[in-house]
Image: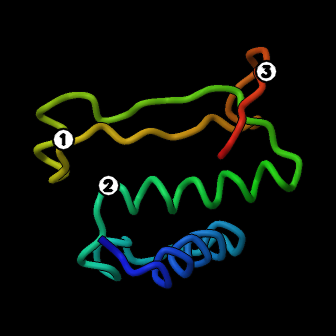
Amino acid sequence: MLAQSDRMVAPELLWAAERDRVPMAPLTSTYPGIDVEDAYEIALHNIRRRVGAGATVYGHKVGLSSEAMQTMMGIDAAPGDSFRAEFSDIGSVSIQFK
């Protein structure tokens, strides 16, 4: 599990890489102690940022549900990713974040 300060820095690194369209090292290299809970919190941080800037969440995609893929990637839970407007043209629903 990451320190709270690292949970605040990691989403900024991802945000900057996406904004500047530059590759970055995997967070598992930068933060060897990262776990699934950290990953979800980091992802939610940037989802909230996008929603705050006017993006709409249209749904939820769950990935890596295959046990073989989870083993290959070294995880024991299927992570998810939110659809953004540029990836989907389905009707929208209201999502409440805590």
Query: Callout 1 environment at 10 Å: few (<14), some (14 to 19), or many (20+)?
Result: some
Residue at image coords 24%, 78%: 32
Residue 3's mark?
A: none
Q: Quadrant of residue 86?
A: top right
Residue highlighted by disc 3: 92
Percent of width and height locating residue 45: 62, 60
* CA distance separating discs 1 and 2: 12 Å
Q: Which residue is mark 1?
A: 70
User: Pointers 1 and 3 in contact (CB under 8 A)?
Assistant: no
Q: Position of residue 7 (x, y in %)?
A: 48, 74
**In the rendered image, which residue does mark 2 sit on?**
36
Image position of 19 (left or right of 26): right
Of 19 and 55, nearer the camera is 55
In terms of secondary structure, where does tag 1 sit?
Answer: helix
Circle 3 or circle 2, nearest the eye:
2
In the image, residue 56 above or below residue 58: below
Secondary structure of the residue carrying numbered label 2: helix
The residue under label 3 is which amino acid type?
Ser
Q: CA distance from mark 3 to mark 2?
A: 27 Å
Q: Is residue 68 left or right of residue 92?
A: left
Tell me the quarter of the image containing the N terminus. bottom left
The residue at 39%/63% (across/down) is 38
Find residue 33 and report its horizontal and vertical position in percent: 24, 75
Q: Residue at x 58, y 38 (%)?
A: 82
The Cα atoms of the two marked residues, 1 and 3, are separated by 30 Å
Q: Mark 3 or mark 1, which is nearer the start of the sequence?
A: 1
* Amino acid type of the residue that numbered disc 2 sits on in the rendered structure: Val
Residue 17, quarter of the rendered image: bottom right
